[in-house]
Image (cartoon, grey):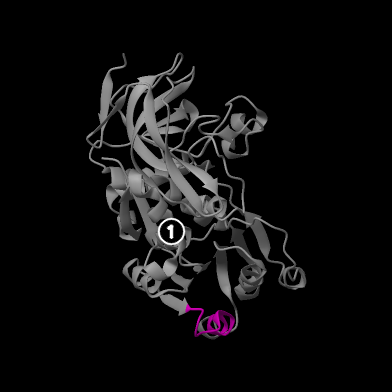
Amino acid sequence: MFLPVLKNGVSTPKNLMKAAIYTGIEQISIREVERNEPPPGFVLIDTKQTGICGSDLHSYFGHWGQSHEHAAGHETCGVVVALGDGVTGFEIGDKVAVECFSHCSSCKYCETGQYNLCVNRAWISPKMHGGFSEFTSTHQSGLFKLPKRMTFEQGALVEPLAVSHRAVARSRANARDTVAIIGGGTIGQLCLADAVSTGVKETLITVKYEQQAALAASLGADHIVNIGDTDVREYAKDVTNGVGFDAVIETVGGADNFNTATTIVRKQGAVVLVAGYYKPLEVNLSTIVWSEAFITGSNCYGYSGMETDFEAAIELIDSGKVDATKLVTHYYPLEEISEAFRVSADKSSGAIKVHVCQE
């Protein structure tokens, strides 16, 4: 007979847990699944709080693949409850946040500090359950300890801030530079917050919804352009005296946004692509030829300088330089994850970041 464990006040057999699994297009539901002990190199985390990412919504809508066997969820944090063989540097009871992938630490990219490009890179919980489950299995290579004083809400925001920190770092913008951000969602807002904390000269962000504009104002944006009533290309031309922005970070995806980014950047400026491009695009490349703009991608997180993007994100949140909790608009228990996804997918609901909570 299995001993019961309590999670959110509900008793379940020790070897079982609840997990949210995609069941079809715009469908996700709770199942009772086996709770496995962590294999060698992995840890088991008692999941506390997990954000719904734009990539989760891509899967929800069927743009990207869906697993019908294992829970997704990677903007997550919790407490270590079990260690697999060979795990070092972590102890039961540690408060942790996780990257969305694991890496081998031995290929050429890993050896040179570019572990986000690891040739053996894999999902953080391969054939196991991610953050939309009561317990999350994660590889130690993508695990970071959090300061004890950090809340679980803050911990669940480390991952998206790390994505944004890397994108700003890839732009190489400094205190003398102007930065434009395409998109007022989670990554766009956190790029704004990171750029402001860096002390760049001037910022612009595009938004579609009232809640995005209000948040951008609270995060210190110099220019907030609602694309529903303002042509951002003309606006950018006016505020830069026709020169363009030193750096543009594109967080949305789609041909129009790509073309806008390459239009509003100055000659020999930098365009950073951090959006989830899920299909081929027909775009205007002549703008790049004539402007000699530098176009680069930003792939998750790794090392930006002498520290990892995760370490930087933890410090930015813990120090108060970035109040990432301003982004969280809705909270739902795991049992209501279907409603959480519906609200997250419908920005007219006022949503920016929706968190699934299991405290």
Q: Residue at x 36, y 71 (%)?
A: 211
For this view, does 224 lie left or right of residue 79?
right
For the residue pair 56 and 289, the one nearer the viewer reads as: 56
Label 1: few (<14), some (14–19) or many (≥20) C-alpha neighbours in 10 Å:
some
Image spot of residue 177 (x, y percent)? 50, 67
Q: Residue at x 41, y 57 (%)?
A: 194
- Label 1, on which residue? 342
Q: Residue at x 53, y 52 (%)?
A: 60
Looking at the rendered image, the quarter that the C terminus falls into is: top left
Extent of the magenta region = 226-237
Q: Quick check: is 232 in the magenta stretch?
A: yes
Q: Is residue 6 visible?
A: yes
Q: Amino acid at mark 1?
A: Arg
Image spot of residue 36 (x, y percent)? 44, 22
Q: Quadrant of residue 134?
A: top left
Judge whether 297 appears above or below 188 on screen. above
Q: Quick check: is 265 in the magenta stretch?
A: no
